[in-house]
Amino acid sequence: MTNNALRNVVHMEERRPSLPQEIARAILEGFDRHYRLFRDAAIESRRLFERAAWPAMRSLARERIQMYDLRVQEAVEALLARFPEAARDESLWPAIKLAYIGMLHEHKQPECAETFYNSVACQVLHRRYYHNEFIFWRPAVATEHLEGERPTYRCYYPLKDGLRRTLEAIIDSFGLEDPWEERRRDLRNVLRALRGHFPRPLRVRPDLQIQVLASLFFRNKGAYIVGRIINAQRELPFAVPILQNERGELYLDALLVGEDQLLVLFSFARAYFFVDMEVPAAYVSFLRWLMPRKPRAELYMAVGLAKQGKTLFYRDLHYHLKHSSDRFVVAPGIKGLVMLVFTLPSFPYVFKVIRDRFAPPKDIDRQTVIDKYHMVKLHDRVGRMADTLEYSLVALPLERFDPQLLAELERECASAIELDGDELVIGHVYIERRMRPLNLHLEELRRDGDEARLREVLREYGAAIKELAGAGIFPGDMLLKNFGVTRHERVVFYDYDEIAPMAEVSFRRIPPPAGYEEELAAEPYWTVREHDVFPEQFDRFLVADPRAREIFYEHHRDLLDPEFWLAKQARVRQGEQEDVFPYPEEARFTRASAGSRRG
């Protein structure tokens, strides 16, 4: 062999990827496939919106929620098939991680790719605990100022083109194919609403601009324009919902302004948005400008990247534990028969662990509870069911547990916990945003004599039940203690062990007694089948306080009528999706033509 030929062989060997590089590349290819399909789903949601294909939109939402786990499993299987021995060699994984980091230098979704790597590594290694050198405990690649081929948001300058033309340009930039119902009217409505937030005399500054995210946000029957207006030191976050009428024509329904209204729009109790993002970190950074009080973890979840949200939440939790000293304690409120619920007072979440045994009258098993929570995860929550983060093998510092809580965990949830040195390891836990239990909130309002707020919260309570029914969910156990109140005083359901699809429930009227003996009988004299529900009996437990019950029935006495439930059930069975707006009715613009197709 000549010297030149030998040098060529040496150079080829040097350029050939090492085994860690090959494994890292295989994992990244698995992630890239996942994110390509994730973006494809966002693009498809736009087509479904334009066709008003609402059942298909709901199906797509369910499929996307399950997409991540399927892609991880595919990547694990591919890795083990290609590298059956090397992939399980733990000594290689520090080098695999280093090789992976090098591949993320120009990547547009590095933080999500790191999380995908962690998911694959944890499944391949079959270990319960992992050294930080194996996985990404902290992010290795910065995402600040990360941008894609196209800008994340567009800037418009009303001083140059005029406000009306600027608004027209914003609408046109999204290129929706459906015709508009009456665009000039809609623009007038937006201009009129804007003037209310910029009262005269308005001092327009040279930097006046409107920044709008380049992609629409799709959810249920609506598409949302999201952006902010900047005028000197003032920044005004906004969102504009685009809906359809019964003829498939588009119209602007409202102008949502300010952080509070956007927090409700992006609430943890609502379904995830579809939004096409080349660089998700850039979208989340923009949304943080609009909603600085919203945790970054919840924003990732809101745009459909639930696993990334879970990763950030877990980091936030451990960061908070390091910088706090209070203890986990039993959560306030009436104790549940199925879940043991505890909280860290300085951290706004609750931790729910399934008990080993359920006391009567609960007649379900552990798997049924897990199935119910999974059903809620896949369902449209219509702003009335709290989202849950599900974790396995969560290790928390033992010293941070109140002795009373620790004793109750050992007594009630022994199969789900394990002591490991100075840590308590919880085998399976659900984590939710902490809310004020509705029963405690109502007691407080009654004590304070605040009838106006009491009336509004009771109206909200009934509305929550009705909206859940309209979305196809029968709450089952509708006691006040199973609902919470958010900081915006919205009532949200959070106890899922007795929920059922509306289509599976048999709503019946109590038959009249055949005689005096049946009328006075202590037990029901009528036959009760497994899925039977008798709404007339709800009167016994919905609201106990006489004055509160009187207020509640001013708005919601129809909840006691089987015909109300049967009508809801019929619409659900026909595939109808009721309109549930993530903003108040009074915020909606007045339209000459009626009939929306949006929920």
Image: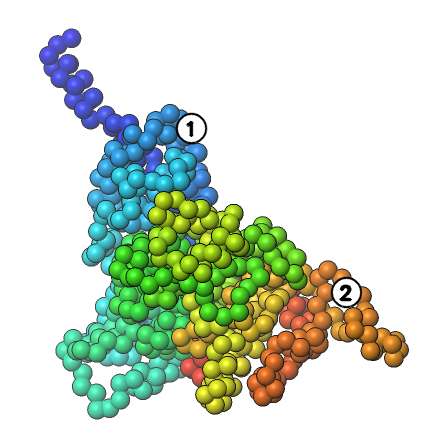
Inspect the image, locate mark 2, and give the three-letter code of the amino acid beneath it: Val
Q: Is residue 78 left or right of residue 454?
A: left
Question: Is label 2 in a helix, a strand or a loop?
Answer: loop
Amino acid under disc 1: Ala
CA gap between label 1 and label 2 equals: 54 Å
The residue positioned 21% from the left and 44% from the top of the image is 105
Residue 343 picture location, percent across and down: 41, 63
What residue is shown with label 2?
528
Q: Nearer the viewer, mark 1 or mark 2?
A: 2
The crowd level at tag 2 (other Cα within 10 Å; few <14, some 14-19, many 20+) is few
Q: Nearer the viewer, residue 78 or 409?
A: 409
Circle 1: element type = helix
Q: Earlier in the sequence, mark 1 or mark 2?
A: 1
Residue 410 image position (x, y, % from top left):
49, 52
Rendered image quadrant of residue 117:
top left
Give the image quarter of residue 305.
bottom left
Figure disc tally: 2
